[in-house]
């Protein structure tokens, strides 16, 4: 009902759109939860608050959506939810109203998580593990959403719409690409604004780059175990918010928030004719397995948002190696992904997506299904069917390696191309015939279903693995700095050090390495298909033999 609770006037509101929506007069809040028995909206006056200033029970419930409209709330308001319901992990339910939860549709982040045992739904260290129930309040530690004003003057911004056959993709990390740039002021380094600077854009255009593929910029977390080891999650494949740009890349001296700064970056790149492709991680979230924290979807509706094990709904199906997988079989989970994709195209003006571990999204039952609902919906969507769609065509589940098997409209990271080109130039025997096939567009993988050579995203190096310099300088990985005794990272790198492991003063080896790099880069650029260059390869960047630099936020990865 309409009326007032305490000092806050409240109206019924609407069940659509989901999230917090500012309409110029007030804010509509809408949260999906099919199995909840109650939802409280919590308003915070400051990110430093240890308790919400207002807790408002939401009484309106339509089509599994809890909704309310607050006419007195403005952009800048920080908020979270408390969701009531059964705590029955054996049945897949993990409701705990003692935990403040991040809105899955949050478009801005007001506060990052502060790691503490209170953000876990169970008592950490209890002999019963996640079957125990933690009644501590997480309000002082939970990540908070912030209401945004989406208004932005785009002017004459238009998507470049570069044809696939003219596209050159350049994979980069927003922070690492400019963190050491000598021509940029320090306050711009490692930021959206730094990437949008005239100096950086000139470097891209001089290279002939037509599209930048950004490593994850959705709001992501630094894993607790990494922080305890003095490391961070540098790459960003640990998403918690699929609508909010990571605020860690926003320049602090610029008045505009992360959303506005991201839009400014896109507009600048578009003006130079450069498309923006996002690396997106819809296969899992930062909440991990059953022993992970309760920060968002787990506490909102665990059994709807996550794939649970059939035999034991206390546990999660894990096709990603990260502890959980999003439940693309549930219509609201699928809606979350589609709403997020459309938002980044329509509101943020991005030009395409690279889907991390995309095979996971095609698992409606267990096997990868190229005719699954995820592909059907994208193909029928009038917005998404027009942007660039790139799959990382594998996951860690059985039958997950699906190079060449994605449907029409999709291009794929061609891992088979990568391995063949590496082995051919390494000098392995028996790869000449296949080398000719890869050079001419990998028709054995893509011709049969009517796709063109541009279905193949050709690459030899990417963020995950050796840089080009290291590919010709190391026979073995050297990941000791990750603190995992060099057990992490791939062992089958198909690399050749040209006669010495790591740096050398031997002039013969140095000349050979330079020639090998030219051989590989020439092959990449002359192959039929779409070339993808790893940022820094043109500069001879080395990670000193690290082939899994996911937690190295330092000069190992910075250019």
Image (spheres, helix red, strand yellow):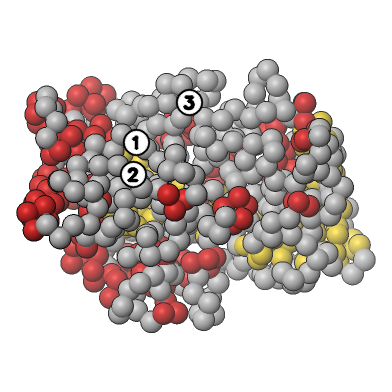
Residue 385 seen anywhere in this rendered image of the structure: no
519 on left or right of 125: left
Q: Is residue 23 left or right of residue 203?
A: right
Check disc 1 and report the residue beneath it: 491
**Picture mark count:** 3
Q: Which numbered disc flags the more N-terminal residue, 1 or 2?
A: 2
Within 10 Å of disc 3 (Cα), the crowding (few <14, some 14-19, many 20+) is some
Q: Is residue 392 above or below residue 554?
A: above
Residue 38's image quarter?
Answer: top right
Disc number lying in front (3 or 2) = 2
- Position in image of residue 286 (x %, y %): 60, 46
Q: Quadrant of residue 508?
A: bottom left
Marks 3/2: CA–CA distance: 24 Å
Q: Is residue 371 left or right of residue 518?
A: right
Residue at 42% x, 69% y is 190
Q: Position of residue 165 (x, y in %)?
A: 19, 45
Element at badge 3?
Answer: loop
Quickly name the residue at label 2.
477
Identity of the residue drawn at 49% across and 74% down: 251
User: Which numbered disc, 3 or 1, marks the residue closer to the eye?
Assistant: 1
Q: Which residue is mark 3?
A: 397
Q: Nearer the viewer, residue 362 or 526?
A: 526
Query: What is the quadrant of the C terminus in the image?
Result: bottom left
Residue 72 x, y percent position in the rendering: 78, 70
550 up-or-down from 355: above or below = below
Q: Earlier in the sequence, mark 3 or mark 2?
A: 3
150, above or below 357, in the image: below
Secondary element under disc 2, as helix, strand or loop, is: loop
Would you call the spot at circle 2 few (<14 residues within 10 Å), some (14-19), or many (20 or more)? many
């Amino acid at each position: 009902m309409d009326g007032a609770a305490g000092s806050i006037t409240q109206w019924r509101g609407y069940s659509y759109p989901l999230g917090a929506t500012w309409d110029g007069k007030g804010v509509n809040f809408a949260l999906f939860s099919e199995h909840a028995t109650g939802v409280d909206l919590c308003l915070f006056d400051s990110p430093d608050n240890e308790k919400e200033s207002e807790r408002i029970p939401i009484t309106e419930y339509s089509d599994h959506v809890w909704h309310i409209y607050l006419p007195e709330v403005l952009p800048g308001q920080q908020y979270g939810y408390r969701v009531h319901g059964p705590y029955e992990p054996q049945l897949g339910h993990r409701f705990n109203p003692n935990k403040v939860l991040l809105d899955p549709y949050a478009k801005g982040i007001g506060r990052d998580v502060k790691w503490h045992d209170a953000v876990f739904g169970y008592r950490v260290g209890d002999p019963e593990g996640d079957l125990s129930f933690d009644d501590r309040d997480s309000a002082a530690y939970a990540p908070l959403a912030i209401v945004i004003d989406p208004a932005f003057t785009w002017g004459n911004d238009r998507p470049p719409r570069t044809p696939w056959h003219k596209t050159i993709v350049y994979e980069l990390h927003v922070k690492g690409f400019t963190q050491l740039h000598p021509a940029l002021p320090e306050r711009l380094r490692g930021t959206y604004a730094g990437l949008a600077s005239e100096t950086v854009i000139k470097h891209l255009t001089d290279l002939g780059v037509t599209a930048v593929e950004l490593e994850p910029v959705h709001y992501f977390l630094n894993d607790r175990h990494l922080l305890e080891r003095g490391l961070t999650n540098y790459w960003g494949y640990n998403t918690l918010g699929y609508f909010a740009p990571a605020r860690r890349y926003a320049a602090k001296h610029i008045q505009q928030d992360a959303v506005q700064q991201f839009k400014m970056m896109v507009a600048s790149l578009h003006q130079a004719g450069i498309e923006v492709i996002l690396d997106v991680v819809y296969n899992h979230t930062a909440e991990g397995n059953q022993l992970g924290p309760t920060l968002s979807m787990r506490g909102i509706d665990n059994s709807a948002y996550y794939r649970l094990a059939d035999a034991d709904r206390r546990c999660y199906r894990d096709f990603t190696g990260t502890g959980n997988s999003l439940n693309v079989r549930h219509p609201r989970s699928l809606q979350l992904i589609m709403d997020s994709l459309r938002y980044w195209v329509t509101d943020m003006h991005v030009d395409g997506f690279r889907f991390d571990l995309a095979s996971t999204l095609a698992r409606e039952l267990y096997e990868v299904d190229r005719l699954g609902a995820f592909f059907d919906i994208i193909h029928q969507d009038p917005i998404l069917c027009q942007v660039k769609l790139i799959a990382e065509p594998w996951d860690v589940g059985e039958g997950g390696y699906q190079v060449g098997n994605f449907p029409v409209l999709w291009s794929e990271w061609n891992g088979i191309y990568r391995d063949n080109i590496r082995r051919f130039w390494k000098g392995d025997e028996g790869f000449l015939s296949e080398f000719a096939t890869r050079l001419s567009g990998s028709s054995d993988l893509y011709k049969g279903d009517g796709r063109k050579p541009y279905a193949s995203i050709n690459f030899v190096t990417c963020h995950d693995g050796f840089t080009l310099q290291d590919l010709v300088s190391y026979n073995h990985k050297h990941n000791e700095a990750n603190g995992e005794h060099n057990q992490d990272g791939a062992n089958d790198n198909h690399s050749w050090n040209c006669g010495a492991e790591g740096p050398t003063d031997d002039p013969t080896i140095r000349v050979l390495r330079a020639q090998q790099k030219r051989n590989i880069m020439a092959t990449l650029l002359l192959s039929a298909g779409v070339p993808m260059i790893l940022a820094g390869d043109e500069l001879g960047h080395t990670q000193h033999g690290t082939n899994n630099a996911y937690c190295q936020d330092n000069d190992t990865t910075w250019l």
